[in-house]
Image (cartoon, rainbow, N blue to C red):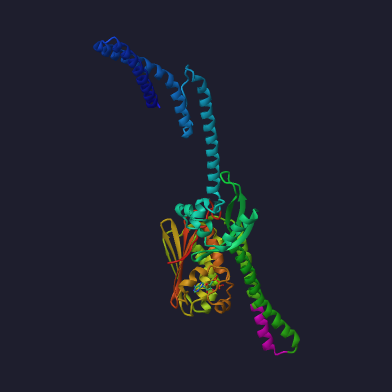
Amino acid sequence: MKRFERQLSFALGMCLSSAACIACFILLVLTESWLLALGIDSLIFLISFLVVYRMMIGMTEPWGKVVFALRRLADGDYRYRVEPSTDRFGVLVPYINELGQKLEKTRQSVEDQRDQLNTIVENAASPLILIDDKKRIIHANTLFKKMFQLSDDELAYQPYDALLPYPQLVDIIRATFANNQPMNKQAVLAFSIERRHFDIHTAPIQLSSQPKKGVVVVLHDITELKKLEKMRQDFVANVSHELKTPVTSIKGFAETLLENDGQNPEVVRQFLQIIWKESERLQHLIKDLLELSKIEQESFRLNWETVDLQDVLHDTLILLKDKAEKKQIAFTVRTEGDTRIAGDSERLKQMFMNVINNAIAYSPPESTVTVELKEKGDVVDWVTADEGIGIEEEEIPRIFERFYRVDKARSRDSGGTGLGLAIVKHLAEAHRAKIAVKSQPGHGTTFTISFRKHRPEPPAREGEAHAAATHL
Ligand SMILES: Nc1ncnc2c1ncn2[C@@H]1O[C@H](COP(=O)(O)OP(=O)(O)O)[C@@H](O)[C@H]1O
Ligand SMILES: [Mg+2]
């Protein structure tokens, strides 16, 4: 602005001094003194130019300050302030500065609101998008971009229906635009090989910068809930099925006995034996179900104490001795180092019983079951290796599921309930122990459970579960 003032003053100075010069020149020419005319004229030109230039600078400078300040405000520099002055434009200075202050305050509050909205949208636990009336996604949180694999560039240049290849999602957004009402729908969306369940919520939203309403879309991922629901349904179906088989059998044989009174005592005995066996199976099943439900309770706690795993193993082998002898299965026991850990001795016995019992049940007669206890730094490994039927690699992660059996008939024959390893897994989690399974079908299986020597902090089951069923 200063340049403009100077140019203007210069131009006016030139004009006025030239006019003064011409007037003097004419006057002196009339007196016919050329040299004098030229000298005096130059002097007059110089003096009048300097006088007018100074005057003009004095007049235009304060005005320039005002124009300059307004220009800065118009450019968005709301922090610019004009120095107070005593000239005739000085009266405008407080107004200009107040205008600047108010604009700055408004901008600050708009920025605060935008930051708040961004924080809410970004921290929302669900993918969320904002679509404007021209179908553009004007805001998408990181969760949304990650889930739908969309970059900011892609979001900026394409309408939502071209970006989202999910007819169910696009339909509900379209319907919200059309009906101008909040909507809700459940949908299954496929992400490469995975199908996820969503509870989609949409609502019209008036965006201040646009004449028509946009739509806000929130996708609640309910896949885990659906899985749990399915698991519960499957569990109820499985329990009913497991109960049905022995109950039907008991009922059938009891009826036959009742209907045919004077039957052969040997047949009666056979039938009674079946009834006894089936009722024992029922008893085991109910006992395991109750155990599992107790262990799965939020309130379940271990009785922490220092336990020597050698003692647990010793007690377990006494209980399983008869069963092993019946199949002529020999035990080989090896221990190495200090085998004391922090744990619950009763629960540990339950784990040992289930795993070693399986080793006996799924091994051929006259084979060997080897049990090792090995101190390894901060952990003690309990290894149970059998020479049995083994487990196919793809089955290994599934054997810890409730009621999952590789061979149903074989498991039933061995008196299994299908819940043993599910109980082991839960108890390992409570101890924060890690499970690893290695198997070769036809050659045998090795279960390794690594217990921590010291009680984990925070107490088990209150922190994250650390047990992992993996195969080596
Ligand atoms: N040592 C093992 N060798 C081979 N298969 C095993 C072994 N341990 C467990 N399994 C398989 O895992 C399944 C689940 O085991 P478990 O939960 O103890 O149930 P159950 O023994 O009552 O069938 C068994 O049915 C069996 O198919
Ligand atoms: Mg079992």
Q: Position of residue 158 (x, y in %)?
A: 49, 55
Residue 156 drawn above or below residue 268: above
Among the 4 quarters of the image, the one containing residue 280:
bottom right
267 part of magenta stretch? yes
* Quadrant of the displayed image that contains ligand 2: bottom right
Kindly identify the residue that appears in the image at 46 percent across and 27 percent down.
67
Q: Main secondary structure of the magenta part?
A: helix
**Residue 273 location, quadrant:** bottom right
The reply, left or right, for residue 319 in relation to residue 262 is: left
Q: Is residue 369 visible?
A: no
Name which residue lies at 36% across and 20% down. 15
Decide which of 241, 49 is in the foreground and name it: 49
The quadrant of the picture occupied by the N terminus is: top left
Q: Is residue 313 magenta?
A: no
Q: Residue 408: which quarter of the image?
A: bottom right
Could you say where residue 371 lies in the image, as x and y percent from the top left?
46, 68
71 left or right, relative to 277:
left
Residue at 46% across, 32% down: 77
Q: Which x, y percent locates residue 376?
A: 41, 59
Q: From which residue to which does the magenta span run? A: 263-277
| Residue 177 visible somewhere in the drawing | yes
Q: Provide residue 117's location: percent of width, then percent of height.
A: 55, 44
- Residue 357 or 155: which is nearer the viewer? 155
Up-down: is 305 above or below 62?
below
